[in-house]
Image (cartoon, rainbow, N blue to C red):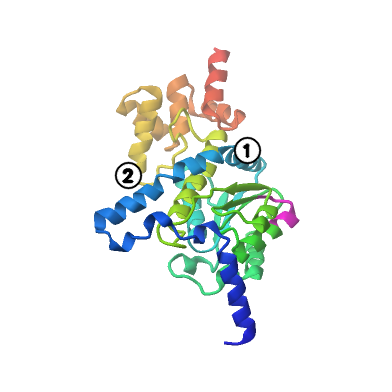
Amino acid sequence: MNKELIQKQSTLIEELKTITTEGQNLNTLDIDLLDATGVLEKINEEDQKIANVVKAIIPEIAKAVDKIVDAFAQGGRLIYIGAGTSGRLGILDAVECPPTFSVSDKQVLGILAGGDKAIKKAVEGAEDNELLAIEDLKLAQLSSQDVLVGIAASGRTPYVLSAMNYGKTLGATVVGLSCSYNEKFDRANDINLCAVVGAEALTGSTRMKSGTAQKLILNMLTTASMIRSGKTYRNLMIDVNATNEKLYARAVRIVMQATECDYQCAKAALDIANNNTKLATFMVLTGLDVDSAKASLLQNKGFLRKAIKQSVSAK
């Protein structure tokens, strides 16, 4: 091994010592001596700490949500970018948005270091490739209208840091999601979502507590942004896309729950509305015909409560 590589490895080892997620958890030093129940109890004890850590940064998460809602309103996108577990979690959250909220698959994107093949198998060196991050964002046509969320449990991943710095040069809103404070990571973003969950049950295994915290926050970002964009009514997924039997049944049930109508009424409304759950619900609640209901929803930018209030006021 040459001197340059030895020096690089030595520097990285010193850097890892400063990363919270790389610390050794004193509560689980004996985890390899326990039976299955004991191991699970130790893991569960650590997991119970996560929700309060996330709760502590809700004010910052709310700032990110406001930026995402503004971006959506102006035709911008939410773009996640990360490596390894962090990147895969971004993809997972992104791909759930179209069926849940009937948005385009281009509105929320997930970019993973190493591309789609890295979803199933790690691509060697991808997380260290700073130029690759810029190339990936150029391919996605990142612009100043978009919100870019860089996801890195350690807060040091070169691929993610490079992506965030590039996003800033374009004027995009840059959000950083990490589980260990890093000064470079903090400087590279406009909104810092740092959920310090502490040392993992297994040292450095950031698919555990860090991954759980990231999953919670990503769910919050998209769900809250969609709610604030008019994609729900009460706590119902009023914009669910009924693309299979289960989702169609869910759509029927949502119409029934939202309007207190029976199955036949909900089904008939969905048939007229071409399976558009929000439109069917609005028609049942107001008695409007399909064209008038469409026009009212369009006028109210898809917000069902506003459209209902306008319709009631007009009577």
Q: Quadrant of residue 273?
A: top left
Residue 173 belongs to the span the image colors magenta: yes
* Front position in the image: 267 or 144: 144
> Going 66% across and 49% down the picture, which residue do you hit?
146
Name the disc covering residue 245, or none: 2
Q: Position of residue 68 (x, y in %)?
A: 62, 43
| Residue at position x 58%, y 58% in the image | 81
Where 204 falls versus 43 (above or below)? below
Q: Position of residue 296 (x, y in %)?
A: 57, 26
Q: Residue furthest bottom?
A: 2
1 drawn magenta: no
Q: Which corner quadrant holds the N terminus? A: bottom right
Left or right side of 93 for 174: right
Identify whether 129 is placed above or below 36.
Answer: below
Which segment is the magenta one?
Answer: 167-174
The location of residue 24, given as percent across then percent down, is: 46, 60
Residue denoted by label 1: 66
Badge 1: residue crowd in 10 Å (few <14, some 14–19, many ≥20)? some
Binning the other alpha carbons within 10 Å of mark 2 as few (below 14), some (14 to 19) or many (20 upward) gives few
Quadrant location of the C terminus? top right
What residue sits 36% from the left and 27% below the top? Answer: 256
Q: Tell me which amino acid carries mark 2.
A: Glu
Give residue 50's mark. none
Identified by mark 1, the residue type is Asp
Marks 2 and 1 close (CB-CB < 8 Å) = no
Residue at figure coordinates x 54%, y 30% from the top left: 294
